[in-house]
Image (cartoon, rainbow, N blue to C red):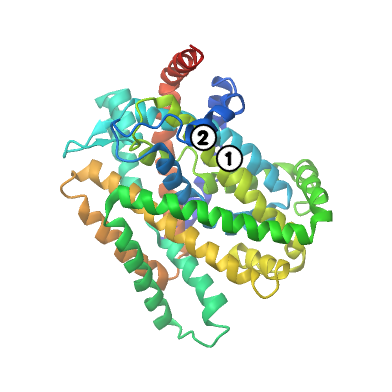
Amino acid sequence: MGQFIIDFSNWIWDTPMLLLLMGGGFILFAYSGFLPFRYFGHALKVVRGKYDDENLPGQISSRQALSAAIAATVGLGNISGVAIAINMGGPGAIFWMWISAFVGMATKYFTCTLAIMYRGKDTAGTVQGGPMYVIEEGMGKKWKPLAVLFSLAGVLGLLAIFQANQLTAVLRSVLLIPNGLDNGETTKWVLGISMMIIVAIVILGGIKRIAAVASRLVPFMVILYFVTVLIIMFRFYDQVPAMLWLIVEDAFTGKAVMGGAVGAVMVIGARRAAFSNEAGIGTAPMVHGASKNNEPVREGLIAMLGPFIDTVVVCTLTALVILLTGVWQSTDNDGVRLTLSAFELGLPGIGKYLLMLAVLVFALSTMFTYSYYGHKCFNYLFGAERAKYYNYFYLVTIVAGAVVSLEVVVSFIDGMYAIMAIPTMISTVYLAPKVKAATKDYFARVKG
């Protein structure tokens, strides 16, 4: 059974998901008239709060919604995912991550615009958003099985087991083992229970507390990461243009790792980007659907900044550190350990501790937001009065994630993500003409 789950995850995240997410995303990108490029500046004005109105329906501000969505996507995918991409596909894989990000910006624009256009109400009468409500309100009751499929996959797939496992591994390898403080299984249990308590304090306060914490943590962790990387880049500043050229050149030659297999480099880059920014999976529309906004297009514009920040900015910073320090050519490490060795080489003595702090904030902020996503899916399936029980299930799995070995479980979660993408992309493409009409109307009013 375990091998079947691993094989299924590997299969569905190869050609099927690339066709669905990249192919569907490119169709939306072209259909929008390349909107992410044309209205990027307007999106920045919106996110600065120029149009916020506290009296509108919803639970949080648009900026808090973006912070919460970025908290969920900016995480271990940016630290270990980039290292895996370079390990498997060479520097050229980063170029195809950039291309995927621009395509993903269009996908996020459409999915999060729809999240405001077609909000529903849960059994308690609270306004809610997300692909399940988009499907039911926008496509009609006969499509409800798709909404149920999305929600079932969300309840099972949006657990923080992977984050708990990786955070435990980093804390042990950087802080505890070198100082003789690690006691094996006992340490895992202590770390797991500690994480559970921290996450419980935040998530049991609901989306307002999650968004408030995320909107403070996200800017802090991005600034910390920026400063650390810029210091390392300054040490190797004369090599930065050469590394950027290497990324572009290798994207079309594949010489560095794949021996000229450009197609394989493209696949690896696109796959890592899909994991990193989650465009088309359906998670971001759930949190953007809760924002105080009655302009669907405005929310979509804010949301489309997510893949840009996540993949074009943060992933590129990680990639440059790995390439500038040369660890990708001189070590057998992979994933988060490869990035750790790059930071240690770039800033001897303190680099690995700064990265550990970033991983700590990345992982915890992701844990906070994932709980909200799973809670909403559970709410849709079983009603608002029972939704609180999901949080207790979610918290227990954090301890399990810290303690157990995770290859099968991670593959299971990846498989659930893929299943979530199917209803999300079907509904988005189906309702895309509604978004295009709303876009035309919105910008006509802005010009007026």
Residue 345: name its quadrant.
bottom right
- What residue is rendered at 67% in x and 41% in y? 96
Q: Secondary structure at mark 2?
A: loop
Question: Neighbour class for label 1 at 10 Å: few (<14), some, many (≥20)?
Answer: some
What amino acid does circle 2 point to?
Met
- Local crowd size for mark 2, using a 10 Å CA cut-off: few (<14), some (14–19), many (≥20): many
**Between 112 and 188, the one nearer to me in the picture:** 112
Tell me residue 380's x, y (percent).
24, 41
Residue under the point 44% across and 25% down = 297
**Can residue 322 be seen by looking at this rendering?**
no
In the image: residue 127, left or right of residue 429: left
Q: Label 1, label 2: how many angstroms apart (C-alpha)?
A: 7 Å
Residue 136 point in image, percent of width and height: 28, 29
Q: Which mark is residue 388?
A: none
Q: Is residue 79 above or below residue 147?
A: below
Q: Position of residue 17 (x, y in %)?
A: 52, 40
Q: Amino acid at mark 1?
A: Phe
Residue at figure coordinates x 73%, y 51% from the top left: 91
| Residue 352 sits in quarter | bottom right
Residue receiving disc 1? 308
Q: Can I make out residue 11 in this image?
A: yes
Q: Quadrant of residue 397?
A: bottom left
The image quadrant where one finds the N terminus is bottom left
Question: Residue furthest toward the bottom?
Answer: 180
Q: Which mark is residue 304?
A: 2
**1 and 2 marks in contact (CB < 8 Å):** yes
Q: Secondary structure at mark 1?
A: helix
Q: Percent x, y for residue 11?
A: 52, 48
